Amino acid sequence: MSTQEQEDIHPKSCIIANPIYDTVFKKLMENERIAKFFLSTILEQQIVSIDVRPQEFTYKDSIPDRSTEDTGYSVFRIDFMATVKTGSGEHKKILIEVQKSYEEDDLMRFRNYLGEQYKKMDTVDGVELILPITTIYVINFNLKGIKSACIKVDRNYIDMIGKKPVEARAAFIEKLTHNSYVIQAGRISDDRYATKLDKLLSLFEQNHFIIGKIGKTYPHPQDDEDIHLITSVLHEMMANPEERAKIEKEEEVLRIMKARYGKKNKVIEKQAKTIEEQERTIKDKDKTIEERDKTIEEMFRQIAELKRLFNK
């Protein structure tokens, strides 16, 4: 699509698909230019190569109150692998996942995923290497106490003897630890639109919804070619009935899963409460028995004292 055609579609603002959805995010990351823009903006590093390795699981269940209709929907969990080259010539492996969740319930999945990545070897210029890992998470829940929309968790080497920073870097340490970046979609506001990072984050704003939460208006000026390209792709996803149907299906599956797991969580909470009450009852009984034993012991003590008095 030409620039003029894009401007004809949305000269000032447009309706775009919400990129927090896995289906939409995957579509963006399949575009090499968009993927490189995303990575380079977050990491502020040169992108050497990229490789999208989507992981997916198929969720099959019956939709409540609709006989036995099968959703049969594949939910994508993107493993986005990239090789970047730092100013010092070091290569790093980059991992990206997008999470569509309002709770921190995928923590173990992230940990297991990282464990698998640490086991793998990568090939750079025909040579197998163990590369350092950097993680980037786009989450749709707010971290308590952290109001920033984009956080970098950066490691520092500290000399514990001299109590001072260590500037040198060791491959052994670099390959056993990693930096992280966390984008909180719910913390992104309309107030900032100045830097390259601001413009990238603006695409993930969870505001201006007009079609449930799958579609929204994008109110910012598209004065950047990469932003213009991204909004064009997102606009076309909303305009294309097939693409839009995929997003709607993902939303429906997420709603079902939330409802189902919500019910399971309530049952678990109820069971936990019952166990807690039973434990409290047992403690009360133990206390009663302990008090009774003390009473009996006191009675025997008094009887012994009376016998002593009578035998004088």
Image (tube, helix red, strand yellow):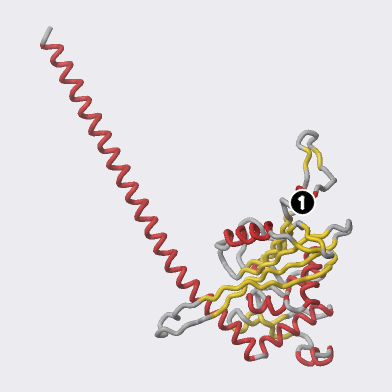
Q: Is residue 63 above or below residue 179?
A: below
Q: Is residue 304 left or right of residue 271?
A: left
Q: Image point 63% across, 91% down: which residue? A: 241
Residue assigned mark 1: 174
Q: Position of residue 260 (x, y in %)?
A: 45, 72
**Image quadrant containing the N terminus:** bottom right
Considering depth in this image, is 21 or 69 the residue closer to the camera?
Answer: 69
Q: Position of residue 74 (x, y in %)?
A: 57, 78
Q: Image point 57% across, 83% down: which residue? A: 248
Q: Is residue 149 above or below residue 249?
A: above
Evaluate whether residue 199 shows in this view.
no
**Image quadrant containing the C terminus:** top left
User: Which quadrant of the view contains residue 303?
Assistant: top left
Circle 1 residues within 10 Å: few <14, some 14–19, many ≥20: some
Amino acid on which the number 1 mark rests in the picture: Glu
User: Which quadrant of the view contains residue 107?
Assistant: bottom right
- Element carrying mark 1: helix
Q: Image point 22% across, 26% down: which residue? A: 297
Q: Image point 82% across, 43% down: which residue? A: 166
Evaluate whether residue 224 shows in this view.
yes
